[in-house]
Amino acid sequence: MTIGDRIYFDPLEIRDAKRAADRLESAKAMTFEQCARAYLDDHRESWRNPKHRQQWEIATYVYPVFGDLPVQMIDRQLVLKALKPIWKTKPETANRVRGRIETVLDWATAGDLRKGDNPARWHGNIANALPKRSKVRKVKHHPALPFAELPAFMAALRAQEGIAARALEFTILTAARTGETIGATPAEIDPNAKVWTVPADRIKAQREHRVPLATRALAILEEMPRGAQYALPGARRGKPLRTNFPREVSEKRGPSSAHRSRRAAMSSRSEPGTSPWVARCRALKTPQLQQHRNRMGGRTSPEQRPRREGFRKKEGCSAKPLC
C-alpha cells in the first residue's frame, strides 16, 4: 500500500502469501499417487457399490508413469505419455483414465496443492493431441431386441426352465435392472396390492420406486422357495443370484441379455403409434390402462367414442400384450 512517497506492507497480506508459498512447497513433496489415494478416501462414502472404488483405481496405467512425481509437476506431456499406449487399443478405458486424472488434479488444485490449468482437460487440450474415440474404434453396443419381437421372445423364455430364466422373465416384466432383481426381498413385495417397492438405496436414481406387478410376475414369485432371504434366490442357500444370470440364459438362447430386452422396452417410445406408458401398462395388465381408456372416452357417452377411437389409433392399442 502506498501513501504519499512511502510504501507500507500489510502484515496480513505478507502472512497469507507466506502460507500459500509454504503450502505450495509442501505440495511438491506430495505425489500424484498420494493425491489420488487421498481423493478416494475423501469420496469413499459417495460410492454405494464397493466395486466402484476398485474400478476407479488408476494404478495400472498412471502410477507407473508419474505416480511418484510431485503433483505440481504433472503436465500435458506426462498425461499423454500415460494415455497414448492404450488410447487406440482401449479407447473407453483410456477416456475413463483421463477423466480420473483430471478429477485428481482438480482436487489438488482445490486444495492449493498445485496451480495452473488442468493438463488432463479434454476440450481445447487433450482433444487436440489425440484422435476422437469414434475414429479410433467404433463403439459396439449390446444388441437391442426389436420391440415387435418381444412377445415371441417372452414365450420362448417362459418355456425355458431354471431360476435364471425366471429371474430374467421377471426383470423384463418389471422393466427393472438386474441389480434390482438380484437384491429383491420378499418384504418388498406386496402381493395384495400387486406392487414391488424397491428402496431408494437400491435404485440408481436414489428414489424409492414402486413397480406394478403383472399376474405372471406374481406367479413367478409364487414359484420360488418359501422362507428364502431373496425373492429370487440363488443356487446356494442364503445367497442371491449371480450378477451374470442373464448370460446364463443367453448361452442357451443366444444374445438375450437383460439389457437387450430392457432396451426393447425403452425403444417402444420410438415405435410409431405406441406410447411407452400404454405399452408398459398393456404388458403388465394393470388397471391404470383401462382407467386411462375410460378417461379418454371408453363407455361414457356416444359423442366421446370418436375421441376414443382416435386415441386407440394414436396409442397403437392393437399391439399384442407381452403376457
Image: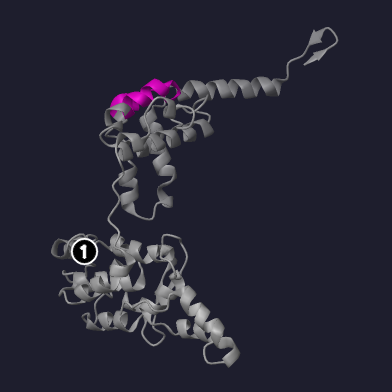
Residue at image location 41% in from the left, 26% down from the top = 30
The outermost residue toward the top is 5
Q: Nearer the viewer, residue 105 or 81?
A: 81
Q: Is residue 265 left or right of residue 300?
A: left
**Image quadrant containing the C terminus:** bottom left
Badge 1 amino acid: Phe
**Is residue 149 among the parts visible in the rendering?**
yes
Q: How far from the left and from the top, in percent, is residue 191?
A: 36, 85
Which residue bears the numbered disc 1? 245
Provide the major secondary structure of the magenta segment.
Answer: helix
Q: Is residue 57 above or below residue 215?
A: above
**Residue 195, quarter of the rendered image:** bottom left
Between 73 and 315, the residue placed more toward the observer is: 315
> In the rendered image, is residue 97 in sight?
no
Residue at the farthest right position: 4
What residue range appears in magenta? Answer: 64-83
Residue nearer the viewer, 233 or 310: 310
| Residue at the spot 36% in from the left edge and 30% down from the top edge | 131
Colouring scheme, one of rainbow, by chain, secondary structure, one colour: one colour
Residue 262 pos. (x, y %): 33, 64
- Residue 80 on the magenta span: yes
Report the residue at 21% width, 64% height from top: 245
| Residue 145 vertical position relative to residue 312 in the rendered view, above or below | above
Hey, which quadrant is residue 138 in on the image?
top left
Figure check: 268 above or below 40: below
Was residue 199 drawn as part of the magenta stretch in this picture? Answer: no
